[in-house]
Image (tube, rainbow, N blue to C red):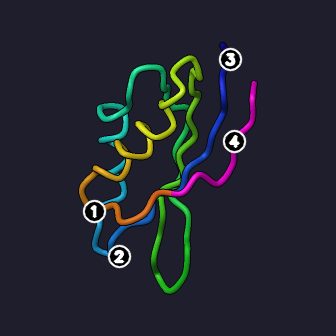
Amino acid sequence: MGQIAAAYDLMPESTEVDLDNVIAQLPGVLPAGVKLLETKILPVAFGLMKVNAGFLIDDSDEEVGGKLEDALRAIAGIENVECVSNTVV
């Protein structure tokens, strides 16, 4: 059993999505074995912003990555979720 540090980009449906509200919802949707480390709101293009979130993931559950991505996609206003980096710690 190890741990994985992973960063995900959460892309909103539009520029109208309240990204601070998205960040506020993150702790409540995380599956067991996942800890939120940090969040940032970053520019994409043409006024569109995204949330970049860092997580510490316990890899004892082989399906935890899929559970995390499903939970992130379920947040209202999020259109796409992409893992942009991960490393074993």
Report x, y in % for residue 80: 42, 63
Dividing the image into 4 quarters, which one contains the C terminus?
top right
Neighbour tally class for label 2: few under 14, some 14-19, many 20 plus, Cα within 10 Å: some
Quadrant hosting residue 78: bottom left
Mark closest to the chain's N terminus, 1 or 3? 3
Q: Label for residue 44?
A: none
Q: Nearer the viewer, mark 1 or mark 2?
A: 1
Which is nearer the N-term, disc 3 or disc 4? 3
| Foreground tag (4 vs 2) | 4
Q: Which residues are magenta?
A: 82-89
Q: Which residue is mark 2?
A: 15
| Residue lying farthest to the front in this orientation | 62
Q: Earlier in the sequence, mark 4 or mark 2?
A: 2
Q: Secondary structure at mark 1?
A: loop
Query: Gap in Å between the C-alphas at discs 3 and 4?
Result: 13 Å
Label 1, residues with CA under 10 Å away: few <14, some 14-19, many ≥20? some
Disc marking residue 86? 4
